[in-house]
Amino acid sequence: MTAPYVCADEIADAIARGRPVVALETTLVTHGLPHPDGVGTALRLENEIRQGGATPATIGILRGAVRVGLTHAELNELATTPDVVKVNLRHHVCRACHGNQSLRDGRHWRGSSRCRHQR
């Protein structure tokens, strides 16, 4: 069993059109920098990727689903939720099988790497 994946329309469109998509983790937002610094840094990074001609796809888990292409509001939710879990590939399967609808996590790069191959 895998967790449900929710792909933002912008990401799905970029993939369908063969445009470059850059997967980004959320560890910087949830564990790397204090709020609001982590969100600001993530948004600046997304902007740099857009200026380079690619579509940023920041990945995290919210409300029990792996979300690919987080919104500004979703990044803020991850940054301000207490006790956000840092999930890597090893933990991803366990979290997905439990189906915890309240689960929020900061996606570690290995987990993000795995998610980018799911469709």
Image (tube, helix red, strand yellow):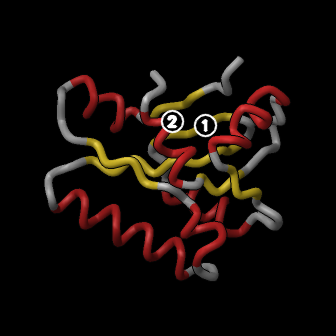
Q: Which mark is residue 115?
A: 2
Outermost residue to the front: 90
Q: Secondary structure under badge 1?
A: strand
Number of numbered callouts drawn: 2
Residue 27 in the image, given as x and y percentages of width and height: 58, 63
Which mark sits nearer the N-terminus, 1 or 2?
Answer: 1
Residue 82 x %, y %: 81, 67
Q: Residue at x 43, y 54 (%)?
A: 24
> Could you give the CA–CA distance between mark 1 and mark 2, rounded to whole angstroms?
8 Å
Q: Is residue 58 above or below residue 118?
A: below
Q: Is residue 50 above or below residue 79?
A: above
Q: What label does residue 54 carry, if any?
A: none
**Residue 35 coordinates in the image, percent (x, y):** 62, 79
The residue depicted at 43 percent of the width and 75 percent of the height is: 41
Residue at 43% from the left image edge and 36% from the top image edge? 116
In the drawing, does residue 104 fall left or right of residue 67?
right
Percent across and percent down for residue 95 are 78, 37
Q: Which quadrant of the structure image shows residue 66?
A: top right
> Is 46 placed left or right of 4 in the picture?
left
Tag of residue 66: 1
Disc 2 residue type (three-letter): Cys
Answer few, some or many: residues within 10 Å of disc 2's Cα (few below 14, many 20 plus, some between 14 and 19).
many
User: Are circles 1 and 2 on residues that touch, CB within 8 Å?
Assistant: yes
Give the amino acid type for the residue marked by disc 1 in the picture. Val
Q: Secondary structure at mark 2?
A: helix
